[in-house]
Image (cartoon, helix red, strand yellow):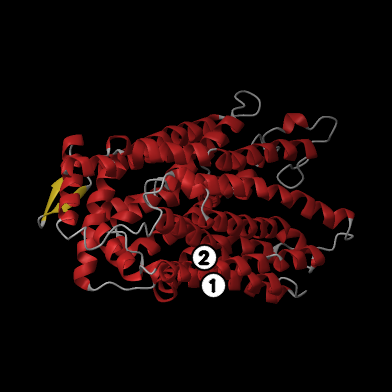
Amino acid sequence: MKLLLVNVLLSVFLYSGMLFGWAPLQKLLLSEHNGFGQFDELCQNQPHLNTTRKPCPAQLNQLNLVYTLGTFTLSLVSLPGGWFLDTYGVRATVFLSGIFQISGMLLFGFSDSVTFNWFIPGAIAMAAGGFLIMVASFPVSFLFPIHQTAILAAVSCLFDASSLTFAIFDVLVTKNSLSRCTLFLCYSGFAAFVYLFLILQWSWVSTPSGGKHDTVENCDNMEEVAVNDDKAEEGQGNDDHPNPNPTMWDEPLTNQLKSFEFGFILIFCSIQQLRANTYIGLNDLVLLRMGDTTGHYTNIFGYALPSGIFFIPLIDICMVKLGLVGALHTTNVLGVVYGVLVLFQDLPVQIATFLAFTGYRAFLYSVMSTFNAQVFGLKTLGRITGFVFTSSAVFQLLQYPIVNSIETVFQKDPFWPQVGLVSISSICICFTVWFQCRRAGQPTERGQQSNVISYNIQQGIESPLISGRRESSAESSSSQNQSLRRASSFLRSPSKHVPASRRQMVNK
């Protein structure tokens, strides 16, 4: 399973968000056609200059359309992709991602604006495959309960780090005279190997049973494992610890979507992602206004974003020591810090801004995925993630009027829009405090705190990130083994997994 984890993280790093490294890819495209660039035929009535430096507006608009449709697809497929994961399991999702990813890379590699203009379908397919491989990586964290937070943080940070792919492509083309077609062909071939091995690894995933590791090979074995788990739990004394419904893991999706927790994470992520994406879009303008005419600080920022992987240990420590609520507060603090630093009209100070923003973005996506996994559970993780991404994407439409107001209202000065963006973080701070009060008050209000903890331990769903309680080694080993048995059987094939109600009938 450790090898499975390594391959899962490798696939995220290689293929999940590589389309977001568009700038070097666009540079590569503009260097083709004898230096005139792809879509140079759109530059009518213009002298043929070196389009690597001075591409015409029509040419840039077409390339921007390729990127825009590709990135929009990532948000568009989030909900159906999450539904597909919850319905058909990780193996099917990885397979579908491989189909999209490999076909997209082949289309993009062989495309030419004159003879084979399939850039847009290629970019769309790569974006769809990228989201699917990312969302299919979240469930692996349930197989490593002790390190779940670190794994989810790694997935989120490696998604950003995958944007380095096309920067490496650009270097290989420039220094080794390799063609774009050759690079995409080789990369898609390697993807076929990675995806195939990943599917086989998920098929071989094993579960501990009686101190031995037995591979779950078919639906009957899955049912036997699940039933044995419930019998073991039943023997622990269900009468002494009645189900106080302490979590939403067994709630239907409709009830989860109506919950305060879903409303909180939706509002939190929508506001925070609006701030993050708007800052990325405005960063060039902000730095240019501060005097970065050479683009030196812009390049530094471009390499700062993928460095979020260095925050993974800090995120894990913060989750363990401070809990989920503490991590939410840390995200808010980092958001305020970078939002205040960017208001200083000084270029050297912006290096500190880049550092704070990189940490903020790493915390934001890591906390979001950890929240969804810990609060809503494994069965609806894909759909909950899809709903959050889709709703947040709709909220991101506010980015356009914010950016447009800089030109029309504030005379090209982004200072006051930036003040507004850092000010709305107060909404997230207030909601986080409200969430903390509700979570802390629920057990006391019901008078069932001891029953909640006991029931959670029996069910293998105790969450120290929420309750702040650390299990003993014996409790931890028992609950982790039960969680592992459930997770492995469910992840392989959710549609064949025995639901809790049916397991109870079998027990009776």
- Residue under label 1: 330
- Residue under label 2: 363
Q: Nearer the viewer, residue 258 or 24?
A: 258
**Residue at x 69% of width, y 37% of height:** 65
Q: Earlier in the sequence, mark 2 or mark 1?
A: 1
Location of residue 278 with respect to 429 vertically, above or below = above
C-beta proximity under 8 Å, tags 2 and 1: yes
Q: Secondary structure at mark 1?
A: helix
Q: Secondary structure at mark 2?
A: helix
Quarter of the figure that contains the C terminus: top left
Evaluate whether residue 323 shows in this view: yes
Picture disc at residue 416: none
Q: Check disc 2 and give the amino acid type.
A: Phe
Residue 205 left/right relative to 106: left
Q: Nearer the viewer, residue 475 or 415?
A: 475
Q: Check disc 1 and give the amino acid type.
A: Thr
| Location of residue 62 in the rendering, given as x and y in whole percent from the top left corner | 71, 35
Residue 393 left/right relative to 345: left
| Location of residue 80 in the rendering, given as x and y in whole percent from the top left corner | 49, 36
| Location of residue 336 in the rendering, given as x and y in whole percent from the top left corner | 65, 72
Residue 316 left/right relative to 5: right
Question: From mark 2 to mark 1, how far is it between C-alphas?
Answer: 8 Å
Nearer mark to the viewer, of 2 and 1: 1
Q: Nearer the viewer, residue 275 or 60?
A: 275
Location of residue 344 with respect to 466 vertically, above or below = below
**Residue at x 78% of width, y 35% of height:** 58
Q: Nearer the viewer, residue 4 or 325?
A: 325
**Residue at x 84% of width, y 34% of height:** 46
